Amino acid sequence: MDWKELEEQCRECMACQLGETRTNLVFGTGSRTADIMLVGEGPGEQEDLQGEPFVGRAGQLLDDMLKIIRLDRGENVYIANIVKCRPPGNRDPLSDEQSACVGWLREQFKLVRPKIVVCLGRIAAGVIIKPDFKITREHGQWFEKNGVWFTAIYHPSALLRDPGKRPETFVDLKSIQRKAVELGARI
Ligand code: SF4
Ligand code: URA
């Protein structure tokens, strides 16, 4: 499947109930040839309205964080979510919604072929790294699968709620930067 086909098919998806209440499907954004891919949880209100991931308050913080390690969605990262349609009231996506949707993300992985995947928050880490991922204990740790390196950092919404977590996230960002240099990933 190429990007055009994938996006067209995804935009018509009604494989779970989130399809019924979306305003816009939020497919993904950024560089489709990036070496680093970021995965969030699901669209919030602003994302649902604008059809782009991380454009609300959490997104502004994410962009500021990425800038610290010279990453920019217009340049060198691809950003997508576990679920492409907004869970009503910003509740967590249910596990059947996650499993209904994750196939789209897998296709995105196959096309981007990132060297590094950064999960944003517990939900993404639980789907992508391992089911019992403990974000407070395991953020910033590295996991390798088939030559691709995976890590998780706190979700930017968690950092808005609890700024006390920001120093640890700064350390994690620096670790991502080092890993990128080590792997020769474009940053
Ligand atoms: Fe399809 Fe995913 Fe939207 Fe559910 S959330 S309707 S699986 S695109
Ligand atoms: N939170 C997410 O996980 N994803 C978005 O796109 C926006 C907020």
Image (spheres, helix red, strand yellow):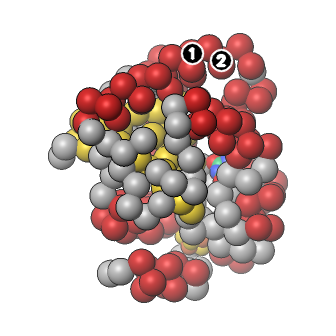
Please tell me how crowded label 1 is: few (under 14), some (14-19), or many (20+) other residues with Cα within 10 Å: few
Q: Position of residue 111 (x, y in %)?
A: 34, 67
Residue at x 50% of width, y 79% of height = 7
Q: Position of residue 30 (x, y in %)?
A: 54, 59
Q: Distance between the residues labelled 2 and 1?
A: 6 Å
The picture quadrant where one finds residue 156 is top right
Q: Which amino acid does label 2 sit on?
A: Lys
The quadrant of the picture occupied by the C terminus is: top left
Q: Are marks 2 and 1 in contact (CB under 8 Å)?
A: yes
Residue at x 38% of width, y 61% of height = 33
Q: In which quarter of the image is ligand 1?
A: bottom right
Q: Give the residue number, with chain letter if any, for mark 1.
A: 168
The image shows residue 171, relative to residue 176, as above or below, that is: above
The picture quadrant where one finds residue 68 is top right
Task: Left or right? Give the position of 79 relative to 161.
Answer: left
Task: Left or right? Give the position of 21 relative to 173.
Answer: right
Q: What residue type is labelled 1?
A: Glu
The picture quadrant where one finds residue 25 is bottom right
The quadrant of the picture occupied by the N terminus is: bottom left
The image shows residue 118, relative to residue 158, as above or below, that is: below
